[in-house]
Amino acid sequence: MDSTSKPGGTLQSDDAARKKTAGILLLILVCIAGGFGGGYVGSSAKLGENGNASLLIRENRQAAINESQLISSIAKNVSPSVVSVDVTGQSAEIPDFFGVGGGSVPQRSAGTGIIISDDGYIVTNRHVVPAGSTSVNVTLSDGTQLSDVSVVGRTSESDPLDIAILKVKDSKGKKLQKATLGDSSGVQVGDKVVAIGNALGQFQNTVTDGIISGFGRSVTASGSNGSSETLQNLFQTDAAINEGNSGGPLVNINGEVIGINTAIAGGEAQNIGFAIPINDAKGIIQSVLNKGVFERSYLGIRYVTLTDDYAFQYDLSVKRGAFIVPGNNGRGSIITGSPAEKAGLKEKDIITKINGVNIDEKNSLTSLIGRKPVGDEVTLTLIREGKEQTVKIKLEAAPAV
């Protein structure tokens, strides 16, 4: 007899009871299976997370190994082109205290240089071989000492480009390996770089790495003799640069020299070093390699590099460029007989471009001119009395100082 269900009714047939029991058992089995499956999925996800972490660790480890191998390879390839420079200067007098002591001792200093030709030309900093140096020796990466070395030339103390050229006259039969010079105009903030040099004047070919932290920097550098010099258009790097590194190479990941290490920030600053972009020295380098003479291109003007403050001070609408300042005290700002005078430049002219390249925080006038060898013709874009015009000018060698 079929059962009927009424509100509140409880009567069931045996067949219905069996069906209900089977349903309950099925539900229990489903719950057990679901729990097992959830646990399996959860454990698999955990294993996946651990697997991803392990993969990340392996990738980081491999990246560190690759970077270490890269730096090692750069050091191996570039170091033979890096020399230690040892300089003996004019003697310093020792005071005579009550008849005890007195006399003089030679001044010695050390720096670094970069071989730029297989016949012995080396580029370094001016302050490494200052005026008054009586002898210069270089030590190759294999320890060979060469004493027959001359100073071909150096920029003047007032020049913001701190460069000197040396020449090895007798290499003692050693084959000199020249460095590969890169193009510093393409350098970007964040680029990986390696610095090599004679750290502290005693640790030859020390290798440090870092990045380009900035460019277009201007700094006032102090020498050990109390002198100071204003340097422009420098790279800033966090690659460790120490005393003795001056004149050494700052290279990119291709092993190309893109800078010449030249200064470090003092005081409480940490990991702030500066290097001259190699392009700024190429005009001099080409002159030496092509003609065997040290020549520095110049325009022959006295100017200030415009900033917002200078533009306000001189009441100028143009805020970037090289402003030829008005002369004072009978001193003109256009040097007599200079390329600038011959090209008709005038005081209060604002030079805004050289060959289409803007003069700004990244490129000073001196830097852009320094990239060109003597004899090159360049096009200046300038503002005169509110109107833009162009002037062609043939570069000449700066007078010897």
Image (cartoon, helix red, strand yellow):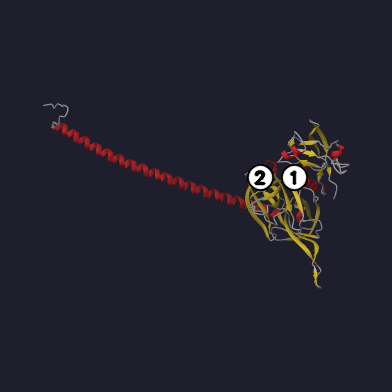
Give the vertical position of 24 relative to 135 (above or below).
above
Q: Residue 67: x, y in percent? A: 58, 49
Task: Report whether 346 appears left or right of 224.
Answer: right
Which element type, helix, strand or loop, lies under badge 1?
A: helix
- Name the kind of residue labelled 1 in the image: Asp
Which element type, helix, strand or loop, lies under badge 2?
A: strand
Q: What is the tally of numbered marks visible in this picture?
A: 2
Assess disc 2: are there few (<14), some (14-19) or many (≥20) residues with their C-alpha within 10 Å of its C-alpha. some
Badge 1 is on which residue?
A: 280
Give the vertical position of 129 relative to 284 (above or below).
below
Assess disc 1: are there few (<14), some (14-19) or many (≥20) residues with their C-alpha within 10 Å of its C-alpha. many
Q: Say whether marks 1 and 2 touch (CB < 8 Å).
A: no
Which numbered disc, 1 or 2, marks the residue that appears first in the sequence? 2
Question: In this view of the protein, which residue sits in the foreground, 257 or 102?
Answer: 102
- Name the kind of residue labelled 2 in the image: Gly
Q: Residue 263: x, y in percent? A: 70, 52
Badge 2 is on which residue?
A: 214
